[in-house]
Amino acid sequence: MNAVVHAQTESRHLLSGNEAVARAAWEAGVRVAAAYPGTPATEILENIALYPNIYSEWSVNEKVAVEVAIGASLAGSRALAAMKHVGMNVASDAFMTQSLAGVVGGLVIVVADDVGLSSSQNEQDSRYWGRFGHMPILEPADSQEAYEMVKRAFPLSEEYETPVIVRMTTRVCHVKAMVTVESQRIEHRAAGFQKNPQRWVMTPANAKPRLPLLHERDRKLRELSERVDLNAIFPGGDRRIGFVTAGPAFMHVRETFPNAPVLKLGFSCPPPLAKIRDFASQVETLVVVEETEPLLEIEIRAAGLDVHGKDILPRFGELAPSVLRPAVKPLLGEPYEVPKRPGVNVFPRPPTMCASCPHLGPYFALSHIRNLNIVGDIGCYTLGAGHPWNALDTCTCMGASLSMAHGMDKGRGESDEKKSIVAVIGDSTFLHMGMQGLLNMIYNRGNVTVLLLDNRSVGMTGGQENPGTGQDLHGLPAPRVDFAKLAEALGVRPERIRMVDPYELPTIVKLVREEIKMEEPSIIITNRPCSLTDRFERLQPYTVIDDKCTGCGNCIDLGCPAISVARRETVTAKSGKSKELVFAHIDANTCTGCHMCVGTCAPEAISQPQPQNRTIWIQPHA
Amino acid sequence: MHDGIINILVVGIGGQGVMTAAEMLARTALSQGYDVKKTEVAGMAQRGGVVSSHVRFGPKVYSPQIDAGEADLLVGFEAAESLRWLPQLRPTGVAMVNTLRIAPPVVSAGLYDYPVDPISELAAAGIEVHAFDAGAIAEELGNAKLINTIMLGAISDHLPFPAEVLKTNIIEGFRAHKPKLADINAKAFDAGREAGHVRAFSQRPAAQTS
């Protein structure tokens, strides 16, 4: 997968920011690395897993990942946890206290903010956590810097006994750029856990004396920020505007205003306010360019300096050259007109579920049953909100479906009286944070029908493993959780635990109809693997027999991308009403022969040229 | 080319090999001593969505993103997707387009229309357009997955380094990882290169001599 594992010192490589972080972690002597997959951070652990001498794992969620890293640090090992921005919210309980207690082995939290929301439910600025948790933040602007800063983060963490945040964004994680490899791995031996209850048992009595130490550490970090070479001035001849910037925004500033002086903050928290003051005195106007919140801007203004920032720049999204130019040019007295480009009108192409995706069956069922409130979750099945299913009503955060559904049940309003509440969640999201919601619902005598769509994969991030797949981060066999037993242990009555093959459409429609009538929680568990993973078996494609197709369009409603409209005809029915017929076509290259659409076709117009035995892997306790 | 930077935009649909093609271009540019950055706007692209990959190389590249109207070369793996990204192209830019048409479910369902003739629309914008059926060539060669290499062959004479350099980089990659596919990809590259010149529907603006 990645030749850089064997890279020679001083060789040059085209690496993504995530690949650069992995190489740096290995060189820095990291012994334990943990993460939960999440775009755009997923590839950090996938790449770390390729290196020798590092224990690495997919943890069940980000809080667990950080706690694993904390434990390793207390044992004296260098440790790293990686996550996307929303993962930091989950992990925060752990690091907010550990920051007070401190660390032993270097502890680095790499967080990837999805600036521009390419694949997230919100856009949040993780730099707040540095202020909130009293932790220094390093902000790389590209792959080379990600590599260098991760290596520097470990000794920094050890010297100041603090977790260090390396704050990446999508535009660092996923950009491939040149990296010059500087060295090979340097081992850092762990001394082992040194018992010290006053230090590590955070009771109030032990935590309180840490507070002055925390603030003393802050003071020392502020001093370091003033002198560290990561905060550097890039001189420029045009002193009308001086920019203070950090992360990939630096690249956009240099691209757009190559002659302007720039104070680049690689060590952005705590910020070097004296250095910024000095820089401000060298330029006519100071502009802060930061993604996404006005954090530095507020701190600089509080220090008594005049500064432009979000008064002229957007408060969200990437600050690309196309954004900077029109915002900043007027400050220079140079009005800027956006150049006219040819207008084009092309249909949208929203992401959709895949051919033979095992989520298609459940959504076909949900879209055909009336009077449901469908509370969703984070994963590929969130796409069920889109065309043609329109069968998902909420999506908030990992695991929220079960607890929000419970709340929606308990807080029923007038229009909900005849409605059934359904929660839809995937295997990995259920294990991440969903099962607590089920436990809560059982304990509090709720009534929700849960659809647990087990596709044996973290699908949306690219098919990673989890405790339900039977394999670990390295693809090695691992203990596999039994969802039915787990649901029973949490308190769902065995009669209300229903296993179903999501390809058997009539069965799944019938099951959902049955379970929503029950006056108690029930859980319907599907059992087909993600069709993009190796666990999926591709069979001979189906075709539509034109003579038999009656144009009912049922199979189109399934939403399988292998099925498209061949032609439409308007006919007049006996009643005199005109009716549109939709004749279907199955693309042989896309169809995987899963047979799901056969269940939508009453006239039996969908057939396989050479029928073959299907492998069905219903679990034994089904 | 401006400031010595070449901007190439590779566009298509998730799963077509857009990112792999962009990666090949970036690696080849790196091997020629350029500073290189490559970035994607992919989102949840694996699910059949829009993919655009930006490749920038030159003496020193800062921003990885190609600004609107700054692309020198647009490599389109699908007809409507090529049209979608037209505003990214310079007025003097070149578009190399696969005429393949892939209609998404929202079009199939009749919610939107697929453009009648995206290639003519591109041509009407006054840019240099080359369009050909890369899928037909892949079929002649017996493997639909060759479209990627065919498209790289097609643009290989529009790059600041010799076509052979790109070809060698691609084929060496196959020899190292999938040796069985090396020869057929070499053929695909050559066929694409020829198609880019000969078989393509080509429009060159009158004022231009390239």
Image (spheres, coloured by chain):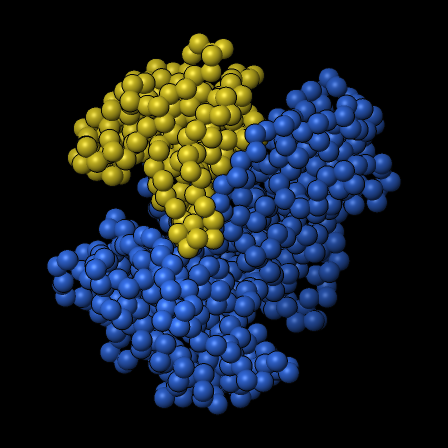
Chain colours: A blue, B yellow
Q: Residue at x 44, y 9 (%)?
A: B209
In depth, the one of A557 and A104 nearer the eye is A557
In depth, the one of A603 and B200 nearer the eye is A603
Which quarter of the figure has residue B73?
top left
Which quarter of the figure has residue A412?
bottom right
Q: Residue at x 71, y 31 (%)?
A: A326
Residue A1 in percent (x, y) is at 32, 41
Residue A194 in the figure: left or right of residue B199 = right
Answer whether residue A530 is visible to the viewer in this image: no
Residue A71 in percent (x, y) is at 50, 61
User: Compared to A606, does A11 lie above or below?
Assistant: above
Residue A465 in percent (x, y) is at 36, 59
Which quarter of the figure has residue B22?
top left
Residue B204 in the figure: left or right of residue A414 = left
Point out the image quarter for the C terminus of chain B.
top left
Answer whether residue A198 is visible to the viewer in this image: yes
Residue B207 in the figure: left or right of residue A340 = left
User: Compared to A437, does A580 lie above or below?
Assistant: above
Q: Residue furthest right?
A: A304
User: Compared to A378, does A290 lie above or below?
Assistant: above
Residue B185 in percent (x, y) is at 23, 30
Q: Residue at x 22, y 67 (%)?
A: A604
Marks counted in the figure total 0
In depth, the one of B139 and A213 nearer the eye is B139
Q: Residue at x 28, y 64 (%)?
A: A550
